Image (cartoon, rainbow, N blue to C red):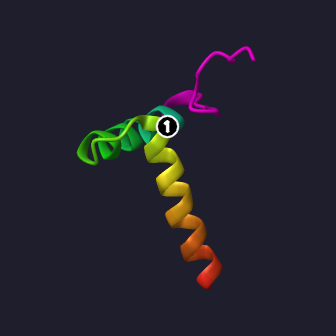
Amino acid sequence: MQKEHGQVTGIIWRGPDDLALYQLVKQYAEKQSLTVSAAVKELVRIGLKEAMRK
């Protein structure tokens, strides 16, 4: 598989808004002692659980 420019953890980060979001995910990952990839998976899992409760 060839990664596209700006792709990290299977997500393509483009533009200033995406970069700002990536920085927040990176900070979260560092606080939780996780890789960015693991942090993204955890945040998606949390968000999906919350969305399914609605």
Pick the residue in front: 41 or 22: 41
In which quadrant of the rendered view does residue 51 lie? Answer: bottom right
- Left or right, 54 with reference to 35: right
In which quadrant of the rendered view does residue 47 lie? Answer: bottom right
Name the amino acid, label 1: Ser
- Counting from the top left corner in percent of width and height, residue 46 is at 50, 65
- Left or right, 28 with reference to 12: left
User: Could you classify mark 1 by the number of other residues whose Cα lies within 10 Å: few (under 14), some (14-19), or many (20 or more)?
Assistant: some
Check the picture and name the quadrant holding the N terminus: top right
SS of the residue under disc 1: helix
23 over 54 or under it: above or below: above
Residue lying furthest right: 1
30 over 15 or under it: above or below: below
| Residue receiving disc 1 | 37
Residue beneath the point at 56% across and 28% down: 15
Query: Does the magenta-highlighted stretch encompass residue 37?
Result: no
Which segment did they paint magenta? 1-16
Pick the residue in front: 52 or 34: 34
Pick the residue in front: 28 or 41: 41
Report the label total. Answer: 1
Query: Does the magenta-highlighted stretch encompass residue 10?
Result: yes
Residue beneath the point at 46% across and 42% down: 38
Check the picture and name the quadrant holding the C terminus: bottom right
Q: Main secondary structure of the magenta part?
A: loop
- Counting from the top left corner in percent of width and height, residue 16 is at 49, 31
Residue beneath the point at 64% across and 15% down: 5
49 over 10 or under it: above or below: below
In which quadrant of the rendered view does residue 8 lie? Answer: top right
